[in-house]
Image (spheres, helix red, strand yellow):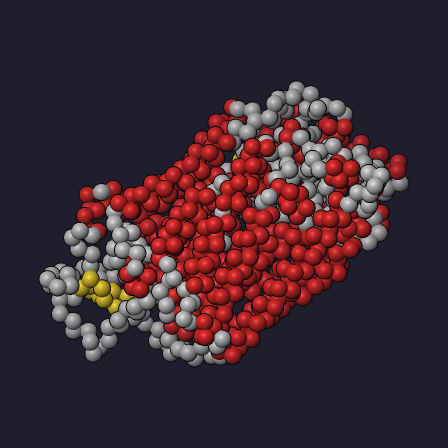
Amino acid sequence: MSIIYVLLPIALFLGFGFLALFIRMSADGQYEDLETPAYRILIDDEKITSENQLEKGSIHVS
Amino acid sequence: MSAEQSGSSTAVETPASGVMERFSYDDRIVRQFILATLVWGFVALLLGVFIASQLADWRLNFGISWLTFGRMRPLHTNAAVFAFAGNGIFAGIYYSMQRLLKTRMYSDLLSKIHFWGWQAIIVSAAITLPLGFTIGKEYAELEWPISIAITVIWVVFAVNFFQTIFKRRERHIYVAIWFYIATVITVALLHIINTIQVPVSLWKSYPIYAGVQDALVQWWYGHNAVAFVLTTPFLGLMYYFLPKAAEKPVYSYRLSIIHFWSLVFIYIWAGPHHLLYTALPDWAQTLGMVFSIMLWAPSWGGMINGLLTLRGAWHRVRTEPILKFFVAGLTFYGMATFEGPLLSIKSVSGIAHYTDWIIAHVHGGTLGWNGFIIFAMVYWMVPRLWKTELYSVRLANVHFWTGFLGTLVYIISMWVAGITQGLMWRAVDGTGRLVYPDFLETVLKIVPLYYVRAIGGGLYLVGFVIMLYNIYKTVRSAPADLKDDVVSAPRLTRNTIENLGKTPHRMLEGLPVVFSVLTLVAVGVGTMIEIVPTFLAADYVEANPLLKPYTGLQLHGRDLYVREGCYLCHSQMIRPIPSETLRYGEYSRAQESMYDRPFQWGSKRTGPDLARVGGKYPDLWHYRHMMDPREVSPGSIMPAYPWMYRDKTDFAIIQKKLKVMKSLGVPYTEVEVRFAEQQAREEAKLIADQLVAQGAPKGTEEKEIIALIAYLQRMGQDFKKGLIQ
């Protein structure tokens, strides 16, 4: 059962890695607002067509 | 590549909105992944119906090696999981992550390499698996060159994925992305750890783990493949596409966060529930069982959150096939994740394990959950990506009902088959004897249900073909010019991603992609080589000097057993359950498989357990049985293996095999390795001569069947000779 010495650290790494990530993201403010994100994804991107493309100050990137 | 990609120009800061940037999404790659999903989905389902029919009527094996069940079944599972679901996941991820992060994918080139690399892997699987090139572990069958290719392509995807996150324009990372992140990281680890192999030749390798170790690693992988290929990415996709389709925000964003983190934390521990009542130590079994039961809560958190997202939109479910697929998909997810913890309870597993109940369980998940979520996604994305209308909503509804009915017919028939057979195996009468001592009787009882199952799978396939037609007509009506839309979003400014500039994130971004890819591949390959000695140093099972490893011929025969996929229908693990020891003999000990690479404990008994088959029948019985199972076992549904009587044993490779095994710590002597070929030939001659004496034809000593018989007759002998207590 020596494989446990490999699997256990990996399982712990994954489990607690996700836990650490969660704590960090919470501290980072990812989860301060739990209302807006649910609504924001429903808003479709406004497509830029030849008529409205002259938005002031916008730049073209990838 | 379009002009938008060429990149930078001067930034103009406007106080109100920050810097507005114009960019486009890469929709071409999404379209490609969708088409691949449809093509491979058809192949996977067709193969499924084919092998289901083979179980109903053995003649459909046609006596052709590469069409036989044992070789087709891995192809079906790999096609379903990695080709159909895999491409579906990629399509959904590439579509949603660009929009959620408000950025184009980091590199169109990496996206292309990912797409074509993945398709090449699938094609190579479709060629090598029917040829019998297999590692012999479920869902991880692909031999080492393809395994390495999978690692490379996955790393390419991961680099592209994380770099896209780093250059996002939306500070908040939506819950769907979290699910994708968990998938990308965990799948890489699972795959690399489980498929560390030592090559013997280009298409043959041995795992560095043996017996109980191999079993634990394999099911740690196997279960989490279900978790991180068929669950987390699909939940992520559900969290994007369901709210979009329903035009409602997700019911509780808070719940989505909670159930995500608890799900990824708990899932990784549940693997050992595939090994209940086996030779795996009890504490590991209990651990797996407890964590599996805990999984109930986060799983249902996801289902409830999905279904409640439809609040106020239920009237639309009546008319919109996309929402129908989501509702049914989530319900099947709820059912499967209710059933999973239930099956992980030891006493339930005692009845269900090795039966078709498990087959019902996985198909409830794959057909009902994964399939339906993919269909919903495809119906939603295709009109948007091809800038047209869906050809026929009515046909999509027909698809839904056909698929739904097919899934129900499939899982109900297999529930009945599994429970029937499980109870028959256990039935003991008042005098303590088995009520159904003849295994075959329990098989023949459920064969009619195999026909029903094939019909269920067939219906699902019909529904799929209806979708193919619908999508074909839709795509045909698309405009010729499918230019990516240009959109605009403000660049992330101060207090957002710029702040991370001094952190390792930004430094990582600075690294050239090629370097990242090479490093990670090196890690993968390096692990393969370096980790070997570490594993060999420690014994996992008490050393037993009385136990001799397989002879060269037996080892070669064992590899033939793996090649033909015997493990897909026969277990080699007798559980310590009274009815089972009555049927097969003493329960299996860990020591018995200590030289087994890969372990062959199996997960399904379409045929009886073989752990103690050695010496049970004379050689001639096996000789006749493999030629035509019905000759010695009337009514058997096992395929025939005529090619093993034609094809010659490759005696030359046996020495190499022993060498690799010796390097892995198997106690072969120098003499045994040096004279491996000669000894194997002598052993084969002995068996062939005895066969002639029993009435078999002459001149079989060089044929593969002899090596297979040598292995079959070895199974369980150590125990019978009293070498193991």
Percent x, y of residue B636: 79, 52
Of B708 and B609, which appears nearest the observer?
B609
Residue B410 as seen in the image, left or right of residue B706: left
Q: Is residue B657 visible?
A: no
Quarter of the image with the C terminus of chain B in it:
top right
Of B131 and A6, which appears nearest the observer?
A6
At x 45%, y 38%, the residue is: A11
User: As displayed, is residue B325 above or below residue B160?
Assistant: below
Percent x, y of residue B518: 36, 43
Q: Is residue B42 visible?
A: yes
Percent x, y of residue B143: 55, 45
Percent x, y of residue B665: 57, 26
Residue B336 as seen in the image, left or right of residue B647: left
Q: Place residue B56 in its image quadrant.
A: bottom right
Give the tally of numbered discs.
0
Residue B20 as seen in the image, left or right of residue B305: left
Quarter of the image with the N terminus of chain B in it:
bottom left
At x 58%, y 58%, the residue is: B364
At x 26%, y 45%, the residue is: A27
Q: Place residue B482 in its image quadrant.
A: bottom left
At x 47%, y 58%, the residue is: B303
In the picture as drawn, the residue positioned furthest to the top comes out as B545
